[in-house]
Image (cartoon, helix red, strand yellow):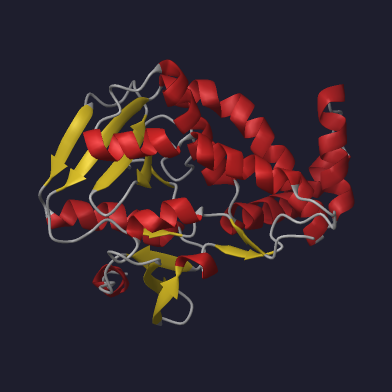
Amino acid sequence: MTVKMQHYVPRSYLRKFAISGTERLFCYNLRTGKVINADIGNIGGEQHFYDFNAPNQPFEEYLEAIESSISKIYRAILIEETVARLSPNEREQIAIFLIVQFSRTRHFREFIKDWTKANRDGLLGSNPSSNDEEFISNIIRSGNQELEIKGIQKTVIMRLISDLTPLVLRMKWIIFKNQTRDPFITSDNPISMFIPKEFPGSTMVGFERKGIQIYFPLNPSLCLCICDPTSYDQQGLMQISEPQEIDFINGLQVNSANRHVFSSEGDFSIIRRMKANQ
């Protein structure tokens, strides 16, 4: 029997942003502008999101195993407010979790759809290596059918784990501690990226880009930033006391979200401020 509601934002993660003592949080719908008090079991996912019309769902189980593997490490980071004490193995597990979170969402699936549309002609005329033939064949055959795109997304996730983990481990890891009254928020696409304008190609973000800053809110008080080690000197724990800096990080969450923004509080004034400044 297939699982119906399948989360691309783990419930264990959403609990970090839940209203105290509950399994609920506030959810802002970017398309309707409405705010609801939502059960974490009903958000951050879709029905049959990973299903392949199979009697069991090994890929869903694989994702759950990754979530489970970092639960104690994640808890320790929140308690100690540092990543400096992580062992090499623990840091690698967190890196894999972040890469998977980046690539498992609806937002990333839509990116794959758009990319296949834009590149099908080029792929048809390409001369791929034997390792890439099946992957490219699947893209060409898909015609953007949801079931085929699911398979492509799964393949991409596994490739990114292999390709990006060494890169993420070489990057600089910083914890931002929120000292303001405004909480960090998160979204249905919680890995956000930013490159300052002074870096060439700042509009083309990616893990390997010069000047890249990658943000992942850990809870309303802490945010992990992973950045290009050749471009920034900051490290360790950094205190944030200016509301404008919280607005910047929260604004990245709003911009990266596919549809929903989540908060432990019902105040989404950051979205109104962003619209007013457009």
Most extreme residue toward the top, as rendered? 88
* Residue 23 percent coordinates (x, y): 40, 66
On the image, the x and y values in percent for residue 185 come to 32, 59
Decide which of 251, 87 is in the foreground and name it.
Answer: 87
- Residue drawn at x 22%, y 27% is 236
Kindly identify the residue that appears in the image at 72 percent across and 63 percent down: 48
- Residue 2: which quarter of the image? bottom right
Q: Quadrant of residue 90?
A: top left
| Residue for point 86% across, 47% down | 140
Q: Tell me residue 260's x, y (percent).
A: 46, 68
Let me know if residue 217 appears in the view.
yes
State how many labels appear.
0
Seen at 81% across and 29% down, the residue is: 132
> For the N terminus, which image quadrant?
bottom right
Q: Is residue 198 visible?
A: no
Q: Where is residue 234 in the image (x, y as percent from the top left)?
A: 21, 27
Specify whether 103 is left or right of 21: right
Q: In which quarter of the image is the C terminus?
A: bottom left
Q: Is residue 267 left or right of residue 118?
A: left
Q: Relative to 76, is 41 on the left or the right?
A: right
Residue 162, by quadrant, is: top right
